[in-house]
Amino acid sequence: MSRPSALAAEGPGDERLAEGQTLVVDGLSLRVRVSARRTRLGLTIERDASLTLRTPEECRRHRAEKFVRDNRPWIESKLLLSEERRQLHPVRSLYDGEIHRYLGRDYPLLLVDGPAGHEDDSHDGQARSDAPVRLVAGRLRLSRSVAADPQQARKAIAAWYSRAGQRWVRGRLQPWAARMDVAEPPVEVRDLGHRWGTYRAGPDGGGRVALHWAVFQLPIHLIDYVIAHELAHVRVAGHGPDYWRLLGRALPECRHLKTELDELGRRVWMGDVGTQP
């Protein structure tokens, strides 16, 4: 969630903010992200309740500190809301019949002896006969020996979602890129911590979209929303009025979808594995 931005002003005699530094203002710690495309200061409350301060180049400390202090009531209200929405992500126990989701559909887990079966690896195009996770005949098959080690199981299932998501998303960006009149960037699926997706502009004007593997548990219309959300950043940095106007032209129901994602997203499995019941 992002705060409406404000014009950045520079002041003499104090340091310029640097990409990646931590700015502490009255007990609030904010990670600084600097962008040459920005003209305004902006605040973002991340899904893990951390704070990001987005600044233009040449922005100086005292103006950033004033901006944070002026927006302290908004920050506190959003942190409270974030805390209310957190802590709902389920913990998986990895037992036979446990429900896992892919593209919004439910699939029961089936523990099997040995590898889960044959799988085509989307990264190198080579067939794999030792895949520890595989979706077949309406069940998510998981090697029993892998399930016995929670960390290994979490890694294997996340890797399966990454491969399956990478395959599914091929060609999915093009229609949304066309609606926004932007070039289709390359996309990768990986662990993004507490973000559903990111867009990173490149030095040559190109960029790259990344999607969290957990996104592919969501219904397809919400995955499309995440894709469109990130593609809008190809043209507009931050989440100011220009951003939402652009996204709204491509996806008129974007505000409704954002609310739906906020609600459903907190029930998505993010990789926590506990003991079997």
Image (cartoon, rainbow, N blue to C red):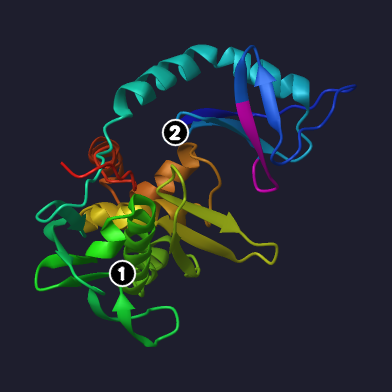
| Spot occupied by residue 36 in the image (x, y as percentages of width and height) | 70, 47
* Left or right of 227 in this view: 36: right
| Residue 24 among magenta residues | no
| Spot occupied by residue 4 in the image (x, y as percentages of width and height) | 50, 29
* Left or right of 13 in this view: 264: left
The answer to which image quadrant residue 207 occupies is bottom right
Total labels: the figure holds 2
The residue most toward the right is 13
SS at circle 2 = loop
SS at circle 1 = helix
Q: Is residue 250 visible?
A: no
Please tell me which of labels 2 and 1 falls first in the chain: 2
Give the camera-side residue of 267 and 250: 267
126 above or below 265? below
Q: Is residue 219 visible?
A: yes
| Spot occupied by residue 54 in the image (x, y as percentages of width and height) | 62, 36
94 above or below 163? above
The residue most toward the bottom is 126
Q: Where residue 13 is drawn, which disc sits there?
A: none
Residue underneath mark 2: 48
Give the camera-side residue of 210 and 6: 210
Residue range corresponding to the magenta coloring:
30-38
Main secondary structure along the magenta-highlighted residues? strand
The answer to which image quadrant residue 132 occupies is bottom left
How far apart are labels 2 and 1 at the CA level? Answer: 25 Å
Give the camera-side residue of 180 and 69: 69
The answer to which image quadrant residue 217 occupies is bottom left
* Left or right of 68 in this view: 142: left
Look at 68% across and 16% down and name the residue there. 66
Residue underneath mark 1: 164
